[in-house]
Amino acid sequence: MWLRRIGTRGAGAGSRLFATYAAASMVSVAVLGAVLIQGYRDDAAGRGRDQGLAQAAVIEEMAVAPALDGADLAAGLTTTQRDRLQRATDLAIFRGSVIRMRLRSFTGQVVFADDGSTAGGISVAAPAFKAATAGSADVAVVPDTERDTEVIRVLRPVRAGASGQAIGVLEVYLPYDTIAIHLQEQMRVAYLRLGAGLLGLYVMLALISWSTTRSLRRHAARHAHEAMHDALTGLPNRAAFRARAESVLESAVRGGSRGAVVLVDLNRFKEVNDTLGHHAGDELLQIISTRLAGTARPEDTVARLGGDEFGLILPGLDAADVLRQLEGVRAAVTEELTLDHVPLSIEASFGVALYPEHGDAVEELLQNADAAMYQGKRGAHDVVLYSGQSTVHPTQWLVVQAELRHALERDELVLLYQPKIRMSDGAVYGLEALVRWQHPQRGLLPPPAFLPAAEQSGLIEPLTAWVLRRALADQAEWTTIGHPWSVSVNVSARNLEATGFPRFVADVLAETGTPPERLTLEVTETAMAGDRDTAIAAVRELAGYGIQVAVDDFGIGYTSLSQLRGLSVAEIKIDRTFVAGMPHDHQDRAIVRSVIELGHGLGARVTAEGVETPRVRRWLAEAGCDDAQGFLFSKPVAWPHVLDRYTAEDIERRRRAAGASAAAEPAQPDETTDHDVPVPQAG
Ligand code: C2E
Ligand code: MG
Ligand code: MG
């Protein structure tokens, strides 16, 4: 819509340009016409005068000179001469070819006049007379007041006698009417031709300017289109996306409406390019573009921002609607496709920033969507809503990476633990280790503030090693005092992809003397969907060592169920978004119920994450969920605080029992206490 407007503006400018060209050529054609007409007129008048001169020459040579004898006219004429002249002039005057004729001496005296008068004629002082006395002829068209018309007046020297000497001046008036009529006729024809020629010229110029402006307009329209569109996919480009976002945000601010800016990045696009070639990569981008555009509403914008990155603007939606719409977009994008006869399914990461919540300026929203997208890239979820300041923007990663390296050396990381509660009796079943960074300036930082940077740089490997060793050391402590809780450690996709990771974990277990089944590694569902084969092989190897593997955040990563079949997964953790939605969303309840069934079918325990209310807890217990974790029971705390839920005697009894049965067979998790109420929360 807004791009089309640019086009219309171009068309308006084009017509104006054409009108200007047409007017300019009209003026030049008119000026040319005027100049030509003036030229014609002057020519015609010149021809008239030439005709007069020629006629006067004939009169002088044929009628006047033969009647004279070569004597100066100042001496007057003989009667014979006068008669001869009279006869000649009478005939000419009678025929109308001469109006008046005078012979004058050089001093101006009239020696002969056709009407017999001895006076009149042009003054001797007039330049025309002087020219004639000097030997040259003068011609002019002058008014004849008597007859109310124009006549041609010619003054020329009279040469007579054998010597051919000038003897006086001939002043003759010739009729101009006939010449004028003739000239007018000639002029009329000339005007007609000229008019037709000029009209033709004008039409031609107008046609040229019309076609020039048309091609200019097309050119400009093409340029405008190219400047705002991506050549490969035909989608609006980054510049157009920004322009659109600016106008959408402007009207959102005015109208108080909301919406989202979404960045979409294809995962493993480079692999497609590297293995199938660039043409396949191009084809993939085109297919994805068509799919993205196909899921957009008329008011949405879909743009290609460069490489494998796309941008969406979804106006008029709240967070829930945005996520719902992106669900459809995600489904369309990931649908299987065939490139070069190779069936592929492409995953994508979506970073979502909402306006006005996450900003009302384009730059800010793009940055936030970008940060959310990178958070998704690291493998937890593929649609990630910007979650505020805790997410570190990729531009700050370098700083975070440098600091984190020191943090590992200076032991600035800390582990908090969140208990997993057994549903059947409310006893603590195990503890999940959740890492924090005690930053010297910024305080206690949550995982999203540094894990993306760690994963991106490879620092995740020493970090996970640290977490693992710390957790096993802490576990040894709580085991000594009689709490045989298992410990869960989160691992990233990057860990699973690193060669030798399972072996490394097995070695650490051996080093610390921990039985492998007392350690659970939590792998997010999307981590397994990343470099699928490597991740799955790693999970198999871990399970082979007897280490428990849990699928974390289950339900949002769209793992195909068949993938889980071959894996010996010990635990499935239902993502907290479904758990949180249960009280009001029957679909969430249906999902939770089927995940519980699925987990049991696979022989795994099922843990619900994010349990915050007794109502949810009850519902989960009824649905047959094995374990639960959440703020209802405890926030993540330093491990000794988990003991806050036990009485002093209880702790003492356990300590003694543990001391007595040291090195006996592995103890069972808590079997005694049943704490149904929220416990004191520290940390
Ligand atoms: P996770 O493994 O799914 O951990 C559970 C997250 O949910 C924790 O966030 C926890 O504080 C939070 N949580 C627990 N109960 C509730 C509840 O009732 N309500 C709500 N709203 N939230 C609850 P946390 O500690 O910020 O960790 C976030 C994520 O960071 C973890 O999600 C995990 O994927 C990752 N993570 C944490 N520690 C590590 C680590 O040592 N290594 C790796 N690779 N990832 C870690
Ligand atoms: Mg976890
Ligand atoms: Mg989780």
Image: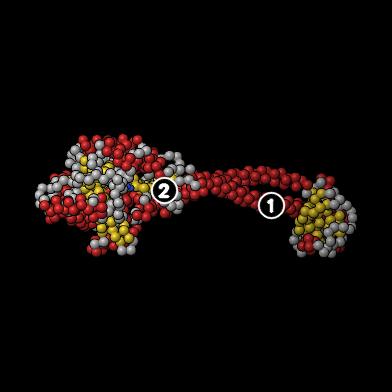
Q: Secondary structure at mark 2?
A: strand
Picture mark count: 2
Binning the other alpha carbons within 10 Å of mark 1 as few (below 14), some (14 to 19) or many (20 upward) gives few
Res. 153 in view: yes
Quarter holding the C terminus is bottom left
- Which residue is pictured at 26% across the width and 61% down the height? 412
Indicate the amino acid at tag 2.
Leu
Q: Quadrant of residue 297?
A: top left
Indicate the amino acid at tag 1.
Gln
Closer-to-camera residue (441/383) = 441
Res. 302 in view: no
Q: Which is closer to the viewer, label 1 or label 2?
A: 2
Compared across the picture, whether 564 is left or right of 331 comes to: left
Name the residue carrying label 2.
354
Residue 275 % position (x, y) = 24, 46
- Which residue is pictured at 64% across the width and 46% down the height? 194
Q: Please say if 3 is above or below 683.
A: above
- Which residue is pictured at 36% across the width and 37% down the height? 585
Residue 546 % position (x, y) = 14, 46
User: Going from the N terminus, do you reach mark 1 or mark 2 first?
Assistant: 1
Q: Secondary structure at mark 1?
A: helix
Task: Report, in whole angstroms, how far the alpha carbon at label 1 lies from the one at label 2.
Answer: 75 Å
Name the residue carrying label 1.
38
Closer-to-camera residue (451/586) = 586
Closer-to-camera residue (349/109) = 349
Closer-to-camera residue (84/2) = 2
The answer to whether the residues at label 1 and label 2 have Cβ atoms under 8 Å apart is no
Residue 120 % position (x, y) = 87, 57
Compared across the picture, whether 292 is left or right of 130 comes to: left
